[in-house]
Image (cartoon, rainbow, N blue to C red):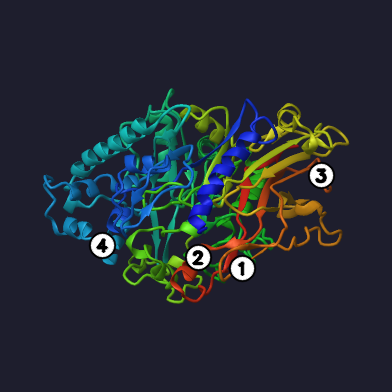
């Protein structure tokens, strides 16, 4: 049986297993796990269009529900399982001139700029178009938009209306949720590189403003003001920062707004209201933590896309201001100083795919991230784009050997999924779960994970049949807050996870704790549940190797180790009731082949250099915060 057919069979098995847990640990009549995509581009985004993507948003919504599509390389592609919810987030900056350049009746259709945009993958043109989105002095191109920009402003309204209508047509309350959304995408261009401080803007219902605020309209802080003014109830919205590993320290720039101006209390409070989540994982890798950087550990080398900054470097590389773990711990100190935590962030994942194919995250069925530059195994394994680079943006550009440069097809991943524990699969149900941070990210597999914290949870809570009900009654779920501890008590955490039957078994669950001690940001990682009945080593604190592996010649899984479910009730052994703290859980699978290994086997090529042949897929829960 080939891998693809095996996945179809496993889908049937998965549905049986998930149904069997419907009244057990996995769900309750109150909340169910729903899996989705909150970051995706279609033919309405200039970069996707110029790389050959022709999927309209409605086609993408159909793909999310199980319909096959034909890719630019001629391959037919479909999900093995439909998604529960999707937000298509095309670049607002694309809505005007791209629409004008594609419409034959447009007054600018025959302009050289439009002909070049329609001509496909053109590195110089890509740099000119995306470079125009720069947050400092961002301006619409007068060639396509007219001297006053009005041509593009009107065209952008029509594109936004089309995107909203596609979501409304696809939305089926109780069965499939199509959220109204877009991406705000400024590019910060400096003398030695470019950085990204992008946000996905998600609306709770179809009640949304009649235009999309873009970087042509102002900064991120201006966007937040605009949302509060233009999205009055019943309209509600949130912004989700993403790809922070490529922000060159600016997406979570302490003390500074995106334009370099100083924080004000009003700005901090507005950000805390409108920005409850961060995208911790996507096709450009993990933003959780980085090897040898800040609050790190031995698992932080997972799917890294950008190198660490060297001495004197800041652009085109990662610092602690780009990493989510460092940022949420830093938020504790900011809250102590300013009375508000602008980095109180839950975790979600997505793909950021530019193929118009939401939720296509399987390592064994990867078709690339961008379109024509990486739509075949040899292109993806080459380590660099033959016709596409971003040197015109001032970035580090592609490294020919596929090394630690800013870009390179071998360094991309299929991306991850966003998951929520929601009361219902509706726009309101999904949005509200995201807003209260009862959300988690996976690196692709549909791992299910529960995380509760409280002072009165029983020591054997994870073994109880009504464990979820106990967790809600005696504690708070992921995304929640623990207030001052009763005297003599430390918080206890209830964890449970189940594996995805289409992927590998589970190896372990960890809790990551962060705190600030004498002004210094600290973190510690605790193994709290090991597979195969094992316990963490008394010296290292780590679970023993369970013997699971992978045959690199076939990608078949080897060894008998690993569990289908893991659970634990854990008490913080070094709790200090006087210190703020933040806790989140990580769940690890046994190793599986990375997509690059599947590609190499498919075409008989050597294994890719500079990336590992296998990965350990994982899930991250949103944190629980302790405030004395």
**Residue at which label 4 appears:** 125
Answer with left or right where residue 308 lies relative to residue 60: right
**Residue at which label 2 appears:** 598
Q: Secondary structure at mark 2?
A: helix
Up the image or down, 569 lies above or below 134; here it is above
Closer-to-camera residue (512/229):
512
Neighbour tally class for label 3: few under 14, some 14-19, many 20 plus, Cα within 10 Å: some
Of tags 2 and 4, which is closer to the observer? 2
The span from disc 3 to disc 1 (Cα, nearest Å) is 46 Å
Report how many numbered discs are placed on residues in the image.
4
**Residue at which label 1 appears:** 551
Q: Earlier in the sequence, mark 2 or mark 3?
A: 3
Quarter containing the C terminus? top right
**Residue at which label 3 appears:** 576
Q: Position of residue 21 (x, y in %)?
A: 66, 35
Q: Position of residue 130 (x, y in %)?
A: 32, 57
The residue shown at (65%, 38%) is 478
The residue shown at (24%, 37%) is 158
The span from disc 2 to disc 4 (Cα, nearest Å) is 33 Å
The span from disc 4 to disc 1 (Cα, nearest Å) is 44 Å
Closer-to-camera residue (376/268):
376
* Quarter holding residue 375: bottom left
User: Are circles 1 and 2 on residues that touch, CB within 8 Å?
Assistant: no
* Quarter holding residue 292: bottom right
Q: Position of residue 308 (x, y in %)?
A: 56, 67
Q: Secondary structure at mark 3?
A: loop
């Amino acid at each position: 049986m080939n891998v693809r057919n095996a996945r179809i069979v496993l889908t049937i098995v998965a549905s049986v297993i998930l149904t069997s847990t419907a009244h057990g640990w996995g769900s309750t009549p109150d909340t169910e796990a729903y899996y989705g995509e909150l970051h995706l581009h279609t033919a309405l985004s200039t970069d996707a269009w110029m790389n050959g993507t022709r999927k309209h948003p409605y086609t993408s919504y159909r793909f999310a529900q199980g319909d096959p599509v034909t890719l630019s390389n001629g391959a037919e592609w479909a999900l093995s399982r439909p998604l529960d919810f999707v937000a298509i987030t095309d670049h607002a900056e694309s809505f005007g001139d791209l629409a004008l350049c594609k419409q034959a009746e447009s007054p600018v259709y025959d302009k050289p700029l439009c002909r070049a945009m329609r001509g496909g993958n053109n590195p110089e043109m890509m740099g000119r178009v995306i470079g125009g989105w720069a947050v400092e002095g961002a301006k619409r191109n007068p060639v396509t938009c007219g001297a006053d920009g009005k041509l593009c402003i009107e065209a952008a309204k029509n594109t936004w209306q089309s995107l909203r209508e596609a979501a409304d047509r696809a939305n089926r309350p109780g069965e499939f949720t199509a959220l109204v959304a877009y991406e705000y995408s400024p590019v910060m261009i400096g003398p030695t590189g470019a950085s990204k401080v992008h946000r996905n803007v998600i609306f709770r219902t179809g009640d949304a403003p009649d235009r999309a605020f873009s970087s042509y309209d102002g900064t991120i802080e201006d966007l937040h003001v605009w949302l509060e003014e233009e999205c009055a109830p019943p309209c509600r919205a949130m912004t989700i920062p993403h790809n922070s590993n490529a922000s060159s320290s600016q997406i979570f720039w302490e003390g500074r707004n995106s334009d370099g101006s100083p924080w004000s209390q009003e700005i901090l409070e507005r950000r805390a209201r409108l920005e409850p989540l961060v995208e911790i994982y996507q096709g450009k890798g993990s933003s959780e933590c980085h090897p040898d950087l800040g609050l790190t550990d031995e698992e932080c080398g997972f799917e890294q896309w950008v190198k660490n900054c060297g001495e004197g470097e800041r652009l085109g590389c990662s610092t602690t201001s780009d990493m989510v773990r460092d940022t949420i711990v830093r938020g504790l100190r900011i809250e102590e100083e300013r009375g508000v935590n602008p980095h109180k962030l839950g975790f979600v994942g997505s793909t950021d795919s530019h193929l118009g194919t939401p939720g296509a995250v399987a390592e064994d069925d990867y078709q690339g991230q961008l379109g024509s530059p990486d739509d075949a195994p040899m292109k993806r394994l080459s380590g660099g784009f033959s016709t596409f680079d971003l040197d015109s943006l001032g970035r580090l550009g592609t490294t020919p050997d596929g090394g630690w440069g800013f870009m390179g097809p071998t360094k991309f991943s299929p991306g991850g999924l966003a998951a929520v524990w929601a009361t219902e699969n509706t726009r309101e149900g999904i949005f509200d779960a995201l807003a209260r941070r009862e959300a988690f990210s996976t690196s692709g597999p549909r791992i299910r994970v529960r995380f509760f914290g409280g002072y009165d949870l029983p020591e054997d809570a994870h073994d109880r049949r009504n464990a979820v009900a106990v967790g809600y009654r005696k504690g708070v779920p992921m995304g929640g807050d623990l207030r001052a501890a009763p005297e003599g008590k430390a918080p206890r955490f209830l964890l449970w996870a189940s594996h995805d039957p289409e992927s590998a078994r589970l190896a372990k669950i960890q809790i990551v704790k962060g705190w600030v001690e004498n002004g210094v940001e600290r973190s510690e990682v605790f193994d709290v549940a090991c597979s195969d009945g094992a316990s963490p080593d008394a010296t290292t604190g780590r679970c023993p190797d369970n013997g699971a592996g992978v045959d690199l010649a076939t990608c078949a899984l080897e060894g008998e180790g690993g569990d289908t479910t893991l659970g634990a009730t854990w008490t913080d052994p070094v709790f200090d009731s006087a210190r703020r703290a933040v806790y989140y859980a990580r769940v690890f699978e046994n190793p599986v082949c990375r997509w690059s290994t599947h590609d190499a086997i498919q075409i008989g090529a050597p294994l890719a250099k500079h990336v590992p042949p296998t990965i350990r897929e994982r899930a991250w829960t949103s944190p629980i915060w302790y405030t004395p």
